[in-house]
Image (cartoon, rainbow, N blue to C red):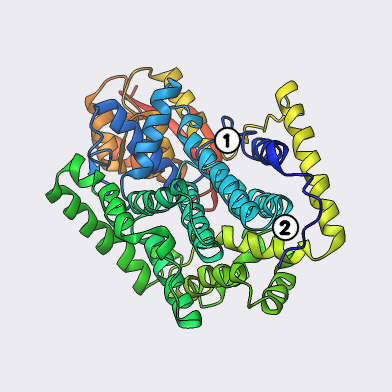
Amino acid sequence: MFSRPLDVASGGLFYAALTLLCAVLYLPGLAQLPPVDRDEARFMQATKQMIETGDYAHIRFQADPRDKKPIGAYWAQAASVNVMGQTLTEPWPYRIPSVLGVWLAVMVTAWAVGGAVSGTAGFAAGAILATTLLTTVEAHLAKADALLLAMSAIVFAGLLRAATAQTVKPVLRYAFWIALGVGVLIKGPILPVVLVLALTALFIADKNLPLNALQPVVGVPLALLVMLAWPIVTGLDEAIRAAQTAFLQDLWPKLTGGQESHGAWPGAHLLMSLGTLWPWSLALPLAALAAWRERASPIVRVCTAWIVPFWLVLELIPTKLPHYTLPLFPAIAVLIASALSQWRPARVAMTGLAGLGVALGLLLAAVPLFNLPRWDDLNLSTRLAETLARHAPGRPAILVGYGEPSAVFLLGTDTLTTNPEHAASLLAASPGAITAVEESALPALAEFMAGVGKNIVRLDAVSGYNYSRGRPVTLVVVTAAAPP
């Protein structure tokens, strides 16, 4: 499958180069980037409330339970924030688990392939995984997907070793089952489904299940024990209720329809892979051809079994988002690395990339450049928080027409999102209170204010781009005053 050139990237240099490459890609902008994804802001806010209340057993966004995702990613983010000791509205500590998750996936993928084939092959697979567009994006977002990628890489590595070696070392064997359990704590049944489909495909193709080396008799109870962490902490009844809510309100709607306007026809994931796997999507035809030629190789068979069945399931599910294919990326990276390793210029390029990773990493450590701009247009919630703090420090925020989760995260858990009528009554009843109202709702607010004998006094305005709605927004900061 892979040729075996001189392993110039093996050993310490091999892993150091990949680590520095990850640092160059994932650390710049981590602190400057505002919350740019609704899910990220919801994760951050729910985690922040855990820390504020000391309640790590329940997931809430303001007063509402948030049971769409399991608790694992929230625990990881809470641990990061507590260790870093930053203010709770700094985004970057919440993102550290995602950075570490992608880094771990890269290291594990490189290690698995390096041990099965060669150090250069492992470096190639790790570098490809590290540099795809989607992994770089997910490393910058405080969500569950990067952590799921890490667990997927560990389970994939265990399966790959089990299929290509007589024995699996105990550390990998235990890591395999623990990662499977942690994957459930992070994102529910996704990882077990990927594994079961892969095992089914291998059994159909080879009439063999490469599980004996992983000792499932011991491993399955270990995975179940890890999964029990949530009901142990929250109580069995609460865990069952949350799981039912997650299935009925999140998973089932995705299986039966295009949830939240994210529906697409079969084939959409293949089309999206041109962007999600960029720039390595350019090598996908070469990888497919090489995989077909080497289809008898155990490594190719494991990679194909890991990718194809779950990808087909994703294409059939109506709801489609780019990150759904992320758990398959370690296996895809291996196939792309396999194809490129058979092309001599690609091997030379990979060796050069190792040196480039070291050089850029040293540059990053020595020179404090790589500061991304604040992107004021996207930083609307941050600038709104700064504006409200100037005009009404310490007061709970009142928002009309702008209910983004990022605003709640930055303004505070007691932020109130309401309608013009209710906002008018609050302004009239609380002298000195202010509200931020979306400009199009300003006439309605003025009308209700007039109804309670008050005028609107305009204090400030913040303009930007609402990335979730895909349109420019102007938020006007107003207070109430008696008519002259």
Badge 1 marks a residue whose secondary structure is loop
Q: Where residue 46 sits: x, y (%)?
A: 33, 38
Q: Quadrant of residue 78?
A: top left
Residue extending furthest toward the front: 166
Describe residue 341's horizontal placement relative to residue 270 as left or right. Answer: right
Q: Nearer the viewer, residue 88 or 293?
A: 293
Q: Nearer the viewer, residue 268 or 212?
A: 212
Q: Where residue 159 sits: x, y (%)?
A: 49, 61
Tag 1 residue: 33
Badge 2 marks a residue whose secondary structure is loop
Whether residue 367 is visible: no
Q: Are marks 2 and 1 in contact (CB under 8 Å)?
A: no
Q: How many numbered marks have been drawn onto this rendered protein structure? A: 2
Q: Amino acid at mark 1?
A: Leu
Q: Nearer the viewer, residue 416 or 256?
A: 256
Circle number at residue 406: none
Whether residue 343 is visible: yes
Q: CA distance from mark 2 to mark 1?
A: 23 Å
Q: Quadrant of residue 140?
A: top right
Describe residue 290's horizontal placement relative to residue 80 as left or right. Answer: right
Question: Residue drawn 27% across and 42% down?
Answer: 59
Describe residue 59's horizontal placement relative to residue 33 as left or right. Answer: left
- Mark with earlier residue (2, 1): 1
Tag 2 residue: 279
Q: Quadrant of the N terminus?
A: bottom right
In the rendered view, tell whether residue 182 sits above or below residue 233: below
Q: Where residue 259 sits: x, y (%)?
A: 39, 65
Question: Residue drawn 30% across and 51% down?
Answer: 222
Q: Amino acid at mark 2?
A: Pro
* Crowding near the residue tagged with mark 1, few <14, some 14–19, many ≥20 C-alpha atoms within 10 Å: some
* Crowding near the residue tagged with mark 2, few <14, some 14–19, many ≥20 C-alpha atoms within 10 Å: some
